[in-house]
Image (cartoon, rainbow, N blue to C red):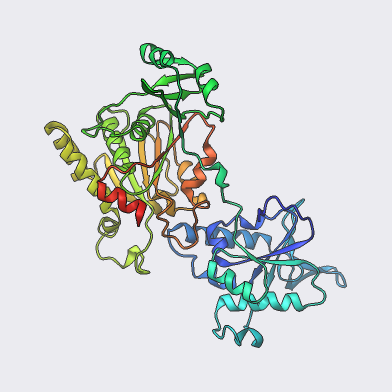
Amino acid sequence: MQQNKEKNKEKKAFVLDTNVILHDYTCIRKFEEHDVIIPTVVLEELDKFKKGGEAKNYNARKFIIEIDGLRQYRINKKVNKQDKNLSALCNGGVSLGPGKGNIEIKNARKVPNFIKDTYPEDIADNRILGMICDMEKDNQETRKLIFVTKDVNLRIKADSLNIEAEDYENDKVNASDIYLGRATIETYPTELIDSLYAEGKSSMDGIGKFYKEQVHPNMFFILKNDKKSGLARFDSVENMIVRVEKKEYCGIIPRNSEQIFATNALWLPDIKIVSLSGFAGTGKTLLAMAVGLELLKQKKYEQIIIASAIVPLSNKDVGFLPGDINDKVSPFMQGIFDNLDLIKNQAGKKDSKWVDDMISHQKDGRIKIQPLASIRGRSLNNTYFVVDEVQNTTPHEVKTITTRAGENTKIVFCGDVSQIDSPYLGIYSNGLSHLSRLKGQDFFAHITLEKGERSIVADICSKVL
């Protein structure tokens, strides 16, 4: 189902689960002319998420504020005054605006006996299912009821009760929209490859003759034939293809064409947002940090900020760990420290000491490692900003991060959609996949890395296991 493109225009009412609101607090406005129903038990659950600095806490607060703004009091026509005991939000609903449906709060106070026979626990999920069943039995209910939840198990439970249930899909990208950022032309003429390398750039006409798909800004190409091969990028500003070369960055040398493309995108100042996706061992974070350190050394930026989407382990939040904020975050950032150590070891003697100095003075130095939650509200200027584990962020979180960019700031997103730890995110609904919507922008580049370079064992295991 696509909530924003309903083909069937019969009147519908979408009942929202708590996890949908925690995922996207603007969700109530994504159902066009159809109605939205919020069970009272959902409001109770949202109340538990009001405090905290994570995205779900922010979304809970924003939604509660929006609901409060929609509260209206029904006019008592008999006495022509407001009846403070009757809220329109809980009695018939309030319009969400022109062309939109109504939003209504519905009581979900108990689990009906016929549901208790199957699901005996008195929990929020079962109360919602019971409320929907009661509504469907109401002879006055003419709308088609659809339960929207990101909880797969709850959708299965709904199916067992003949309740129509669907995932929240408004923020999903289509599988066809997933962007590799690169392409290979197998029969590119030798003379055109020679021309590209002799002059550093050439006309787009050559690409157009051999590559029939749409070419996006900063898309990369492997141009090859039986005799020669070359690497190139489409420069949309000049409308030319330009040569891409292998370079060393703070002791790290890219090992394959995908890594060469990635480092080129990371290096170019006009590309402000870069996303790198690929399974473990393809070098995403290592390349992003190596290029960032080289740019910092050459004073292209004033600081590097490295953040990671922290997903709690064993149901324990960061706050359960002892120490200050750095002590709490460090266990989740160990992969970043490993990459910094590798760069330090690979760099020359002079660069190695410089990198070590930058790492040793995180609090007041130019390399800062922070939890992603601390970025909200900031304005980042003259900053090279690396965000790791982006597959565990929501599309709204990615939007929040990108809007932090100020003057002379580059944002690099790294992640692997096959390693999503959040229970309510999928391959097509996470923040990393959502970045594909930026393809076509001159300031954006994406590369999907598929060749593992960590080790032969890591490469094979990531594919086979």
* Residue shown at 75% from the left, 62% from the top: 12
Residue 444, given in percent of the width and then of the height, sits at: 47, 33
- Residue 153 drawn above or below residue 25: below
Q: Is residue 305 left or right of residue 31?
A: left
For the N terminus, the image quarter is bottom right
Judge by depth and name the residue closer to the eye, 147 or 186: 186
Residue 84 visible in rendering: yes
For the C terminus, the image quarter is bottom left
Residue 163, given in percent of the width and then of the height, sits at: 67, 72
Residue 31: which quarter of the image? bottom right
Residue 228, given in percent of the width and then of the height, sits at: 36, 20
Residue 400 visible in rendering: no
Q: What residue occupies the far front of the structure in this picture?
A: 226
Residue 39: which quarter of the image? bottom right
Q: Is residue 279 left or right of residue 103?
A: left
* Residue shown at 35% from the left, 69% from the top: 314
Residue 233: which quarter of the image? top left
Q: Is residue 177 left or right of residue 423?
A: right
- Residue 395 drawn above or below residue 130: above
Residue 269, given in percent of the width and then of the height, sits at: 39, 27
- Residue 74 drawn above or below residue 460: below
Q: What residue occupies the far left of the structure in this picture?
A: 349
* Residue shown at 75% from the left, 71% from the top: 91
- Residue 338 drawn above or below residue 188: below
